[in-house]
Image (cartoon, helix red, strand yellow):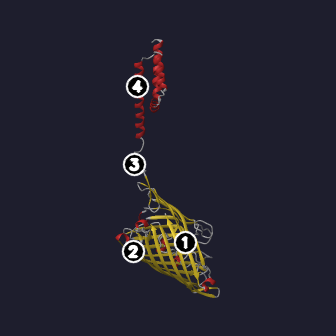
Amino acid sequence: MNQLSKSTAAAIFVATTLLGSTAWAAAKGSAENGSPSVAEELLEILREAGSISDDKYEELRVRAQQEETERIDAAVERAAAKLPPVAAAGDGPTDWKVKWSNGFKVERNDGAFKLKFGGRIQNDWALIDMDNELEEAIGGEGNGTEFRRARIFFEGTVYERLIFKAQYDFANTGDGNTDFKDVWMGLKGLGPVGTVRVGHMKEPFSLEEQTSSKYLPFLERSLPNVFSPSRNTGIMAHNTAFDKRLLWQIGAFHDTNDSAFDFDDNSRWNVTARVAGAPVYAEDGAKVVHVGAAYSHQFRGDNFMRRYRQRPEAHLANRFVDTSGIPTDDADLLGLEFATVLGPAFFQAEYMHSWVNGRDVDDTDFWGAYAEAGYFLTGEHRNYELGNGRFGRVSPNRNFNPANGDWGAFEIAARFSYLDLTDAFIDGGQMWDVTAGLNWYVFPNARVMLNYIHSHVDNRRIAASEINGDADIAQIRFQVDF
């Protein structure tokens, strides 16, 4: 082979090798924007030097491009074979939906991941008028405003079975702290056990307590709610039966403060259980009968002083009845529940009793009860949450839209509640309230609530004086939750 032939062969080998090592996409891009690739420039030099003819130049260039295209396609096929299949848009388990449903919700299409975040704002205003005897002994006459609740929360389900919730209240509690509300985690789908939660949550006691403040027909819960353990930190199991017609809940809880904290040498534990059911549930909840019962045994160590005290049904008022501290060992709580929904009308009542085992003093017991009724003037009905044993959100038949003559939903309600904190050597007093309410549901997640309360106190002893008196309270709430 002569020198020209050797150099020509070497040039062709180098050119085709360089062309094969250059990505086809880059070569194609270079051709499209007018700048030749390195391999094309090398072939061009050989053609100008006379080492290859024009026909040979074109043949080599085209063949190299075809081989490179085939090599890239084969590599792509090999890589794709190792990847999981890609679902069609909108149908795959990795697709997510973001929506508004009275709150912001994010959900993966297969249902394995569900997330929700939101909060509530409740701004209250009140005018309190008291007779002279009650004002001089207890005080609190006047007017004012507060943010009763200002909460944010985040909750969800991950991996289908792991559930959690974190809810905090930024409303002014007088101590400058942010309160823990529901802060828990849990597992669901545990066979007969159902769901188990661990953390700070409501103990299973009282229909009224289990119903969120967002959905109550009055601004405040009734007087006997003073006996409800409300939220503490512990572990709880719950499940349903008979197509969710029956609910049972049981848990053990450590008595904690509003920041879910307690640590000392005085054991304070509650064991609380509740059974509730709906023997009647028809017409998509327009006809409901609810019955329930709850029990709590509260273990207390040495040096514990139990105290029950209660306001009238207005949070801005002072506490009218008060047992002061009672040297206490254990205590037992009993709650009985009844409610019915008959279309736009509803009725609800509860009885609660506390038996206190005194330490070096007589045993005492206290009790309370309430009954309430209401009616939706615009035809809606209270929403009973089957399987949760409580009431939920009411949606107006027609949202507020005055241009179309729609004004939302209107509800009237009335309640009588009674609390007796006097027994044996305890003169905490008796109190009863009569409350009338008017609620305007502007949208499903916005309400304006107006309450009038007449409150009466008997047999409250402060020092050597026995206090009896009356108070009249008008209050209004502006509420948004999301």
Nearest to N terminus: mark 4 or mark 2: 4
Q: Rate crowding at label 1 as few (under 14), some (14 to 19) or many (20 or more) other CA atoms within 10 Å.
A: many
Image mark count: 4
Q: Do the residues under discs 3 and 4 have CB atoms within 8 angstroms? A: no
- Name the mark nearer the viewer: 2 or 3: 2
Nearest to N terminus: mark 1 or mark 3: 3
Q: Which residue is mark 2?
A: 344
Q: Do the residues under discs 2 and 3 have CB atoms within 8 angstroms? A: no
> In this rendering, does residue 206 appear at all?
no
Secondary structure type for disc 2: loop
Q: Is residue 376 left or right of residue 170?
A: left
Nearest to N terminus: mark 2 or mark 3: 3
The image shows residue 89, relative to residue 378, as above or below, that is above
Res. 89 mark? 3
Residue at 48%, 23% in the rendered image:
41
Nearest to N terminus: mark 1 or mark 4: 4
